[in-house]
Image: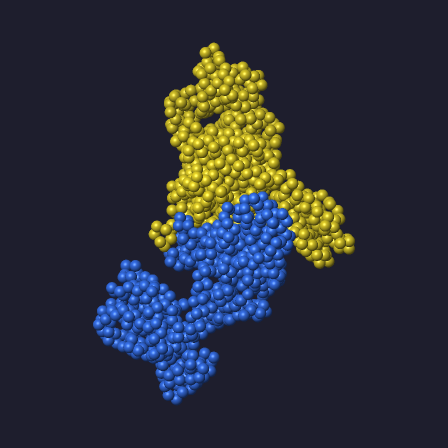
Chain colours: A blue, B yellow
Amino acid sequence: MIKITLPDGSIRNYVKPISVLDIAKDISEGLARNVISAQFNEKTVEVSTIIKNDGNLKLYTWKDVNGKKAFWHSSSHVLAQALQELYPGVKLTIGPAIENGFYYDVDLGENFISEKDLKNIEDRMLQIAREKHDFKIRSVSKTEAIKKYSKEKNQYKIELIENLIDEEITFCDHSSFTDLCRGGHIPNTGMIKAVKLLNIAGAYWRGDENNKQLTRIYGISFPKQKELKEYLNILEEAKKRDHRKLGKQLELFTFSKKVGQGLPLWLPNGAALRSRLENFLKKAQMKAGYEMVVTPHIGQKELYVTSGHYEKYGEDSFQPIETPKIDEEFLLKPMNCPHHCEIYNFKPFSYKELPKRYAEFGSVYRYEQSGELHGLTRVRGFTQDDAHIFCTPDQLDEEFKNVIDLVLYVFKSLGFDNFTAQVSLRDPKKPEKYIGSVENWDKAEKAIINAAEDKGLDFVVETGEAAFYGPKLDFMVKDALGRSWQLGTIQVDYNLPERFDLTYKGNDNKNHRPVMIHRAPFGSMERFIAILLEHTCGNFPIWLIPKQTVILTISENYEKYAQKVLNLLENNEIRALIDDRSETMGKKIRDAEVKKIPFMIIVGEQEEKTNTISVRRHGGENLGSLTIEAFKELIEVDISKTFEQFKINN
Amino acid sequence: MIKITLPDGSIRNYVKPISVLDIAKDISEGLARNVISAQFNEKTVEVSTIIKNDGNLKLYTWKDVNGKKAFWHSSSHVLAQALQELYPGVKLTIGPAIENGFYYDVDLGENFISEKDLKNIEDRMLQIAREKHDFKIRSVSKTEAIKKYSKEKNQYKIELIENLIDEEITFCDHSSFTDLCRGGHIPNTGMIKAVKLLNIAGAYWRGDENNKQLTRIYGISFPKQKELKEYLNILEEAKKRDHRKLGKQLELFTFSKKVGQGLPLWLPNGAALRSRLENFLKKAQMKAGYEMVVTPHIGQKELYVTSGHYEKYGEDSFQPIETPKIDEEFLLKPMNCPHHCEIYNFKPFSYKELPKRYAEFGSVYRYEQSGELHGLTRVRGFTQDDAHIFCTPDQLDEEFKNVIDLVLYVFKSLGFDNFTAQVSLRDPKKPEKYIGSVENWDKAEKAIINAAEDKGLDFVVETGEAAFYGPKLDFMVKDALGRSWQLGTIQVDYNLPERFDLTYKGNDNKNHRPVMIHRAPFGSMERFIAILLEHTCGNFPIWLIPKQTVILTISENYEKYAQKVLNLLENNEIRALIDDRSETMGKKIRDAEVKKIPFMIIVGEQEEKTNTISVRRHGGENLGSLTIEAFKELIEVDISKTFEQFKINN
């Protein structure tokens, strides 16, 4: 009798060895049609694998990350076969699945592949796919494996095999093609209905620039033609929305080789945007009882020894800043919490004075490898919209709910209507991994789950994902392209209050430890603005945009009237500028479109005479002739729309 | 014939050698009565000195810094005489004049002096003063000089003499007392009418802690009793106004041993004050056409090599921040200008687009010896209210005037009505010391002087005081105690535009170098707030103060009404808080006085019934029963008073 346990805990018994596919069929015909890959006792297996012992079985379809991985990994085999046929003598190296698609690194010898050859390779791949070849995995001895690749003179695969353990080496066959492979494939090539080879790049063997440069071919594949089409559309759209491109176009930020990689310089437009976002959050935070503080960007070593960060401050970080005085060294601050703990320690508090909520737009610095830097989403210096709440354990529940309110208010105000959350709890089986009393953990976990339910969040619970110092709640938003981004986070912390010996006087007149909440709705100003840029394609909500309108003069005769309109707009707190260059109106409009300014005001003879303005919306809609007052109202309505839909609870 | 040239250029001729005092008499009897000291051909001389050759003569009275110096230095001789008489065997070391008064360091041997002995010493000093002993200077040989002090077993003076050049050694006699001395004395001790010995401290011989510890006695003296009284009053008042004391009392800022010395942590009240000051300046700057930018707090070594700062970044600075990558090191930014130059370099500008005015509240870090740190006035991390203007040489004149307007607006709005300025120009005899063309220097110097005159500034011109990169204008304000503080600065710079290869396209379609202006009205937020604290004694202008009013409840029965009043005030944008502690009204009022809250609102039965509030001003004035509306008007009038008196020109 073989006992198979499924993820939902249900058990199926079989009298004799049975294939994964047959188990899927036993569950449902639909599942059997869609099953792509599987895991048996935490090990990747094939759909064709025969199960002989008891164990836990997970079946994956296209919807699962592991399903996609098997699908794309299998597609890379098909790519390799096509390359071998079309470019005889090509030497294969590695071909993994990646986050979106797959690649194969090959040594083409004397051959050369360019973008225009990709179509031909794709065609051959689709042909192979349509032939519905089964993927079959088999064990081979090390000697046998090396023999195959010696014959092909493929020193890359030989090198890989030499590092493997004999008896653990497998080959995967399909059609006439064989590859060294650990497994994890779709049942047959027929599942691949759509293929796109995306681009060609150079890559060093084993990532080492002292090795030979190989050719890397990136591709993606789908079980449906429609899905490929959608993916390519998103890719196209994402390129247009690339925040690095938009950041330059809208003159928001720049980088300088001299200042250093990953250290953004905020240009006037970007600084104004940032400041507006900050003011928006400051206002909301003030209403919610936060107090702003300001702390320096460095701290003495001792501060980070106390906080525990110093231990983790390794060789891959910005190194300590030495001073003329031995034993007096500073660290560039990697986070704001230790400074805020020292602010809490400024004077003794009674329970009546809690919670204290200290907020700061705190710039922090963390060293990232230059290869990992990416626009504003991966930088070396960034500003957190940070705050730390110090409260009694009894206040945790309410504080948590208030923070959720604030986070949701922020997301909605900025047009992210679609978000999910993850609650990360401790692993109750491993109490040694966590600090703080069981009682406090129970209280905190309950507080988070209660709060998430109470606020109607769409959330998942992940056990064992809590930090060692406390449970947390993370927010993911979906952008206009359906891509998910992790933004805000709320974390409970029992560790720092202990390390900094924070106390408050209870109503029993004894000293107690406060609980600390770390929270950041945006996460970081840099990352948030990058996501907002890609989400809105630079068409920011009107309350946020640096310039709300541009006044275009028909000729230099109307510069004076333009100035008058500008003054009137500014008196009405509408952010405007004048474009009085001696360019054609067409050119001026095109430039304003590129700058994504929501309203264009055209002034000429007619307007001056009637003391009006002609208004055109970004994108082309003509709003006709308006008075300044009517225009002001128009903008105010646009702004209030964003804010009315959602009210912060305080 | 001896030809004496006076500072005003006038010349006096004398047929035979004549004393300084007689020259003074020749000028006026009044001057002769007041002359304290003199300089002949840039060398300090005595009033009794006989002039034998042609030369330039400057006569000093009590009003001159050099006059005071001679006065106080002479007083230290009198102190030394008194000590020698009262403590036989005392060994004298050095006794210089300092900024305010003088001190003498002595080795008391077995003796000991405490505060209570000072009165006795003062009395003896005044006695000596009244005896009107002339100060007489005379040359002695090295041998003779050493002989005198060998007899007294004074190894300190011997050490000093050994380092002097024979033929340049002088002794000064008065009464029975003789001291080794370079000169610069008042004519006789009778000028000293008032003496106060201020305190006693320890000091190492030659400032080296490996040497013997001496006793340092600090004192001050005046030509009039009244002046001493005024000075002691100011000293007393200054102690009360010490910004470190007020900063703690008003909970504005704190320091933490763990974070590090000289790195202020801004508490909520202080952060709110800072932010209000920043917003005030931001608003004024926006009106004046500035644009805010944001730059990181570090920069790569290359940035500072380009700017020239790296050369000056010595062993007494924060050391460079190393990274995992060799040759990639960063510096904590000591100033914002290099970053702003890189922002200017983001894109090419035409002359029509200039001036560009980039402003940033930029936090910078400079290492200071721990002994030199002092509250907020001498710190290791501070925030400059910095801006850099990039303009064409032709625009310099107007830009400079606009900056002066802004600086004056800032000072006046904050209650500094009394200020002077210093224009620092190049030394035209040493052109090799400066960079930039003569033509541009001429233009810039003329621009500064024109601007200062045009704006009616009370200014002095100092030739040779310009920086090597350009001329500048510094502002000094006088605070409520009459003390002078250097605040804002405006500097012209031809150097950085050269080093960063900044250009703009002129109307000749060729590239030109812009001129750069550095300016900071506050100087630094930290220093400015310290001065503002001492100037106002914490009674900030009402628009600036963190909490404008506190609501004091007579008993817990009125908490609800207090809350209602608070909401009404907040809706009217009045910053208020409630004190509902179960303390007596007397205690609550005293605490509000300590916190320097300008208005106290008392609510009890009477107020609730009539829907009014009882208002009391900080300091005690009772404003009686008011409606919220009337109170709001009261505050608004107070605020508008500050702003109406002065309007910014833009």
Residue A32 visible at all: yes
Q: Nearer the viewer, residue A645 or B581?
A: A645
Q: Nearer the viewer, residue B103 or A52?
A: A52
Q: Residue at x 41, y 55 (%)?
A: A367
Vertical order, A225 against B617 (above or below): below
> Given the current orientation, which residue lies at the most extreme front position?
A606
Q: Residue at x 52, y 41 (%)?
A: B520
In percent of width and height, residue B581 lies at 67, 55
Q: Residue at x 46, y 39 (%)?
A: B515
- Could you say which quadrant of the image residue A503 lies in? bottom right
Q: Residue at x 24, y 64 (%)?
A: A110
Vertical order, B289 against A65 (above or below): above
From the viewer's perspective, tell me whether residue A138 is left or right of residue A618.
Answer: left
Q: Nearer the viewer, residue B469 or A42?
A: B469
In percent of width and height, residue A217 lies at 34, 66
In percent of width and height, residue B424 lies at 48, 32
Residue B330 visible at all: no
In percent of width and height, residue B129 lies at 56, 23
Vertical order, A516 against A184 (above or below): above
- Could you say which quadrant of the image residue B502 lies in? top left
